[in-house]
Amino acid sequence: MKKPSLGTVLWLIAAVVWVHGALRRFEPEGAYLAAGLMGLAFGLLPLLPSARGHGFAAFLRALVQGGLPLAVLSVALLPVLDWLQDVLFTPSALSFHLLAYPVIGVVALLQGGCAKRIWVLIGVEWLKLKRGKLLKGGLLVAILATLLTAWSHEPLEGESGWAIAAHSLGAGFWTAEILLLVLGATAVAGEIGQGTMKMILPHAYRRAEWVAAKGTVLVIAAVLFGLLVSAAGVVYAGATQGLDDVTKLVPAGFGEDDEVQVFQTAEVMRGHLQSTIITASASLVASAMLGLLISCLFDSLVPALSASFLLFVAVKVGDILLGLPRAVLEGIYAQVPDELRELTVRLGRGFNERWDSQLVYDGWHLALLTAVMGLLAAMRLFGRRDLHG
Amino acid sequence: MAEPLLEIRDLTKHYGAVRALKGINLQVQAGTIYGFIGPNGAGKTTTIRILAGLIRPTRGHSYLDGHDLATDRIPAAEGLRTLVEVPQFYPGLSGHENLSVFGRLARAERGEVDELLEAVGLTEAAKRAVGGYSLGMRQRLGIAQALIGNPRLVVLDEPMNGLDPSAIHLVREIIQTRRREHGVTFFLSSHLLHDVESLCDEVGIIHRGEIVAEGKIDELLSGSISGFRLQCQDSAAALAVLEEKLANAKPHAGEGGHVIVTGDESLLAELNRVLLDAGQPPHSVIPIRETLERYFIEMTEGVMG
């Protein structure tokens, strides 16, 4: 029986860090179960081909020698991660996990010496995306959606430019999310279907490096979408209504003048806007990575796009689509879909209602963990499948 | 014998119940042109796809310069270029941009893209989007991408597909020049057996997932004499004698006053004896060898795609 490679162990650690980030706070016992199952899969799957056809004893041997040690390692890693988070880092799990991934990534790079190769691939992928119609067309559509929403919004009495910004950003980011899902879904499946994947894969690069490069370029695209949509909404709102203090006119009492009450200063509102844009951009990155993950599962564009849209709909309106009771959904999702939708709406609608900074934190956390999980799973899956397209 | 540049050992690929490759073994020496031929569905493209890293073998290994192409891919693939089936490119990019993409991947020198475009006769079309290229132009661009970055081994799957006769001649010239001047080794599959026969030093014939014949073309065909062409002082008299004494050899008159007989090397001694006894010693006896096509059909039981 061969021992697991350093690469496999690094992948496993990355997966357990993700389990820690995604489940530990919500499902402490579930995290142990998930980590154990992941370890079992990582240890057992590579040994199955050689055990196949040699009877149940060979399968048991593979389980004992490959699956169980890694399952134990994974489960044992969770308290170590707890300790690292408590002792070495601030109580913020977000910063801990954000730091953990680059550390694992750097170790992986040092192991394979692949930084230079990934850099070359990023250049190639960026050239392809830049010259294609999808990015330019998508950016144009997202900006138009933002501006049209801003233009068609009829402000209520006393509503400030912030409301226009919030409405238009909501529409712009929603459009961008779909477009990035499409960009992600076409990244690999599109190339397989088009036949160009068979031309580029034989070159001296690992498949995981290709996926990492595609993921990096999608992150750049997501940031571009975020910046341009934000710029369009904010500039329009600022130019038409102004982005000043949020105020309310309090009618005067007998013998008094009307009073203008400041709800929020423009400075505080700008801070909220900044947080919202960053969080929404993180969710764009997550959408692109989920698209990339789906893309790695299919050999042609149509099923990849269909699966992406199903996922999009399931995440956005899972409660309606699945028709499941709330208790069940709470067991499946870290946050139930309608809460997710509410979170997005509240973040998008604005900030002149009740501002909840915890939403920003949760949004960040969820989006980045989803993005990392999507990218890691895509790298792993694409590296192991046959390509017939 | 020197270590082979490409070595395939016990390469096996199963698709569920279908056994596409049944443990094939072959060796390709550096600097040679190796023809890989077989009927449709014999396992040629599966083999090439495994070499290209597109699919994983069920069992077995392929080594390039001693590096396993599956487990030690980076150093192995550094010197490998492939062209699998019909080449496809990014339709929105020009021919030059497409080739530049592959040039970057292969870390080719700057001038190499223009040089290769000229070599395959695409300089004038270099700035046009590949979406508007004909099949033949795409095929030539595919050949160019397979040569970029000075590879050691070039694997070409049906490289003459879709090419007109002048383009076929051009590709043949390019392959021979690259082999002669740069020492590039070629591994090519083709249905055009005449091209394989004229281009390749060695061939491997694959049939139903197994290598049924392998070796230098001359050696393979040398054991395949199908008859003899004789020239005698009096051809008519010699033909009459042979018709009487060696009717089994189906003697008949050929072009230029030759007499043709059918049979292998074992016929030669008797042929000489009969003609000498009849006072018609042959001036020349030229063996008629099988063509690669006939040999191929024989080896693949007449199943030709």
Image (cartoon, helix red, strand yellow):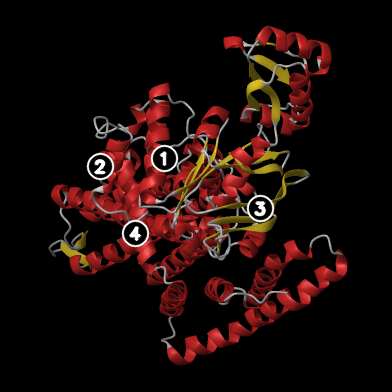
User: Of the residues tagged 3 and 4, which is closer to the observer?
Assistant: 4
Q: Kindly identify which chain the residue marked by label 1 belongs to.
A: B
Residue at label 3? A324
Residue at label 4? A120
Residue at label 2? B114
Q: Give the image location of residue A56, x and y in percent.
A: 87, 67
Q: Give the image location of residue A23, x and y in percent.
A: 58, 72
Q: Kindly identify which chain the residue marked by label 2 belongs to.
A: B
Residue at label 1? B176
Q: Kindly identify which chain the residue marked by label 3 belongs to.
A: A
Q: Are marks 3 and 4 on the same chain?
A: yes
Task: Compute the Cα span from label 2 to label 3.
Answer: 61 Å
Image height check: is A305 above or below A31? Answer: above
In which quadrant is the N terminus of chain B drawn?
bottom right
Depth order, front residue of B281/A240:
B281
Q: At numbered mark 3, what does the secondary structure look like: helix, strand or loop? A: loop
